[in-house]
Image (cartoon, helix red, strand yellow):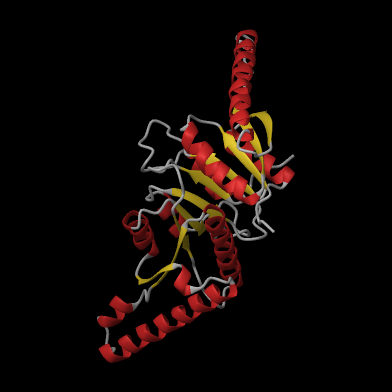
Amino acid sequence: MSMISRILLAVDCEFDKQALLAEVSAVAAGAGAQITLLGILDQPPDDPETKAAVSNIHKWATAAQFQDLEALAVEITDKGIPVVVKQSNGKPYEEIIREASKNRYDLIMKPAQREGRKLEFLFGSTDMQLFRMSPSPIWIFKPTSANRLSQIMIAVDLLAFDEEKSALADKVLRLGKHISDLVGARLHVVHTWDFKWEHTLHGQAVSTRAIDSLVLTLKQRHRRWLDEALETNNLKRDEITEHFHKGDAKEILPMITRDQKIDLLVMGTVGRTGIPGFFIGNTADSVLRQVSCSVLAIKPDGFRSPVKID
């Protein structure tokens, strides 16, 4: 059974239509999923002096957007994928999260936002808000050179005695593997580890041999944790490209995505649910600001968005 049966496709910005159709249809057709196309317009300002004029402009914009959505829906339907069209008014990231939460979509997909900047470097403000606040898996995609997913990489953060991290790692591995199977992409798995006090200890009265022993022990522990995670989630090492590195994930992950020409990075954002205002980990935030590929970001189970649903 597919893990993805209902996809919310939000189109609130300009996009490459052929890239969008290729990427979305590959996932939806493989999963046998239904797509809901969501168009979003800003709420018109409530200014008494301009209310009538603005109201008319908003009606025209709504009608024009609906026409565009209907045309896109026809092209998706022609690929054998059932489509529903919806429209909403408000802040895009809030409306997307509300629709996804109310109707329990398995996946949100959205083209990356330009906002006057180079698309290959940064995500837009709506994209970053979704990465931070969406409880649902959120896939922000950028066009690939061939308009197909050929290289998918899963970034796994492991800590055996941290139940939230372990559960999120399993969730990330399962969904990443599922998508790679759906689209027939090569799957990479990356795990980084580090001994943060190594350089500090070298300056103290601690023998190099003792430090090396600590580093080796830590490496072996992370190696064991990764092996266990792969086995638990039915990922065979001879069927994936594995990247096991010592160092800072904030530097290593962007480097690997560039070197391996990764099309989609699948990662957990480790948003802690009990701390107001803290919805994404520092590592995830830094990586998102550096990578040039599409990203599928996944929250832990139980994550509560600050966006009000009612």
Residue 153 or residue 292, whichever sits in front: 153
Residue 278 visible from this viewpoint: no
Q: Is residue 206 above or below residue 5?
A: below
Residue displayed at 38% across by 60% down: 253
Q: Who's the residue at 61% across and 60% down the image?
A: 300
Residue 67 in sight in this render: yes
Of residues 260 and 309, the one drawn nearer to the viewer in this rendering: 260
Tell me where residue 83 appears, x and y as whole percent. 67, 35
- The residue sitting at 59% across, 31% down in the picture is 75
> Where does residue 52 sit, x and y in percent of width and height?
65, 8
Image quadrant holding the N terminus, namely bottom right
The image shows residue 181, relative to residue 292, as above or below, that is below
Tell me where residue 103 sits by quadrant: top right
Q: Is residue 134 above or below residue 126?
A: below
Image spot of residue 256 (x, y percent): 35, 60
**Quadrant assignment for the C terminus:** top right
Q: How many marks?
A: 0
In the rendered structure, the answer to whether residue 123 lies left or right of residue 42 reads: left
In depth, the one of 102 and 55 nearer the eye is 102
Q: Is residue 190 positioned above or below 221 on the image?
A: above
| Residue depicted at x 58% and y 59% | 178
Coordinates of residue 146 in the picture (x, y in percent): 40, 43
